[in-house]
Image (cartoon, grey):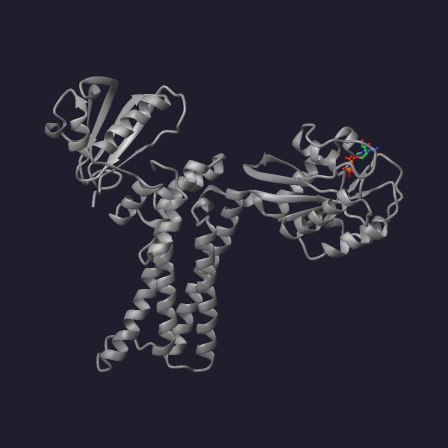
Amino acid sequence: MNNTIAAISTSLGVGAISIIRVSGDDAINIVNKIFKGKDLTKVETHTIHYGYIIDKGEIIDEVLISIMKSPKTFTKEDVVEINSHGGMSTTNKILELLLNNGCRLAEPGEFTKRAFLNGRIDLVEAESIMDIINSKTELTRKMAINGIEGKISGIIKDLRQSIIEVLANIEVNIDYPEYEDAIEYTNELLKEKIKYIKSKLNEILEKSENTKMIKEGITVGIFGRPNVGKSSILNGLLNEDKAIVTNIEGTTRDIVEGSFLFNGIMINLIDTAGIRNTENIVEKIGVEKSKKILNDVDLAMIVLNNNEELTDNDLELLDETKDKNRIIVINKNDLENKLDISRFNKDEIIFTNTINSNGLNELKNKIVEIFNLGKIEEKDLTYLSNARSISILKKCLNKIDDINKAIKEDIPTDIIAIDLKAIWDLLGEITGETYHDELLDELFSKFCLGK
Ligand code: GDP
């Protein structure tokens, strides 16, 4: 099977330079066949060479070629990068020549997959590479680079190390009961260790959920009856006229979305059609959508009109959201107060008046307060940020609960150790020390071509 792969690594389109990347045993030989300049098979590693790409004597492009010989390369294989002039036709033509001369087109993420399989990076680092490509904010970039540097992997590896030490000790107790120097692992002793492992897992999980928020942003739904000022609040927060503001009831029929960056976190706003009982079919669809959104959002903003008494619809909405993260926004604060505010918890309410932008900053600060975002420091960015790893951490914590139950029931230590071993295996899946092929296929297929 041909193991030398090639792909265009820069984005397709018009640009000053394109990079075509080749990796594998035959990388240098194949590129040498289509290169006019020095004999690339005889040059030093990590050097750059000027020349031409040729096809049956015809010059295709003027290029610079980087030669990087195994093992000090991204994939740990021989890697050649061709810097050509940008533009679709030249770049595609060079790729075509490489394929005709013995390369195979790389699958998405295949270079990174090889870096993983050849032991250069672990899975957390591979996922962080994808994160850095996709990062949109300064915080997400910092988070991803911490991942690439291996800080997160280090934390997981330390935890695995402390688990393996306990397991080894239990093993010694079983295999060499006469060996007196080994600590005898009673359930009492195990309990202490489990407490420590649980606290570490919880700490990683809590911070990981925070970092997931940094990566994906917070989704905030704006709910309320028609005409209370939802679109005006959305516009005020976004500082632009994205939603149509009118005083005819029921015009915000569709869902308008917009995002803004606050304290480095992306806040994604969803304006909903008024939740109310309606006979109008178009609006009805909007109402149903609103209810679905209510389930999905991280935070609900319930907008009420200061100038009107509470209606049954308001009460229904307040009841539906009582267990959710929510802010009760009392809008039209410039108008006479007719709303009974004594019924609300003071911590939950923010007064606004969108006519002169009153209260909008307080609203933003409240979001930060609810999610503890003010406390996110750079050191906290060293955590797992993807759903895959977070779900593994949760599985580990479930196993910890099983272990604690078993300790209570006085189950023999060596039987309990089976669950502890399972936690050790699960943590290995985060870094890729234990993995299965389907996981790799799924993970790397999300990468772009040429990465
Ligand atoms: P929505 O249906 O809930 O999205 O409400 P809109 O944002 O479309 O606002 C309905 C009407 O209320 C518009 O005429 C707005 O100009 C007006 N409005 C919005 N906010 C305020 C406010 O704080 N004070 C006053 N007096 N009018 C407001």
Could you say where residue 354 lies in the image, as x and y percent from the top left?
Answer: 77, 32
Find residue 362 and report its image quarter.
top right
Could you say where residue 334 lies in the image, as x and y percent from the top left?
Answer: 84, 34
Quadrant location of ligand 1?
top right
Of the pair 85 and 413, the residue shown nearer to us: 85
Find residue 113 and report its image quarter.
top left
Could you say where residue 192 lies in the image, as x and y percent from the top left?
Answer: 41, 70
Q: Which residue lies most toward the left here?
A: 42
Query: How many numbered marks, from 0 up?
Result: 0
Q: As drawn, is 233 to the left or to the right of 206?
A: right
Of the pair 393 and 336, the residue shown nearer to us: 393
Of the pair 87 and 223, the residue shown nearer to us: 87
Does residue 200 lie above or below 153 as drawn? below
Q: As drawn, is 181 to the left or to the right of 253?
A: left
Could you say where residue 357 lies in the image, as x and y percent from the top left?
Answer: 74, 31
Q: As drawn, is 425 to the left or to the right of 284?
A: left
Q: Residue at x 80, y 39 (%)?
A: 250
Q: Residue at x 34, y 65 (%)?
A: 163
Does residue 156 lie above or below 104 as drawn? below
Does residue 4 lie above or below 288 as drawn? above
Q: As drawn, is 402 to the left or to the right of 171?
A: right
For the C terminus, the image quarter is top left
Of the pair 258 and 416, the residue shown nearer to us: 258
Q: Is residue 278 visible?
A: yes
Does residue 311 lie above or below 134 as drawn? below
Q: Residue at x 35, y 21 (%)?
A: 86
Q: Is residue 274 visible?
A: no
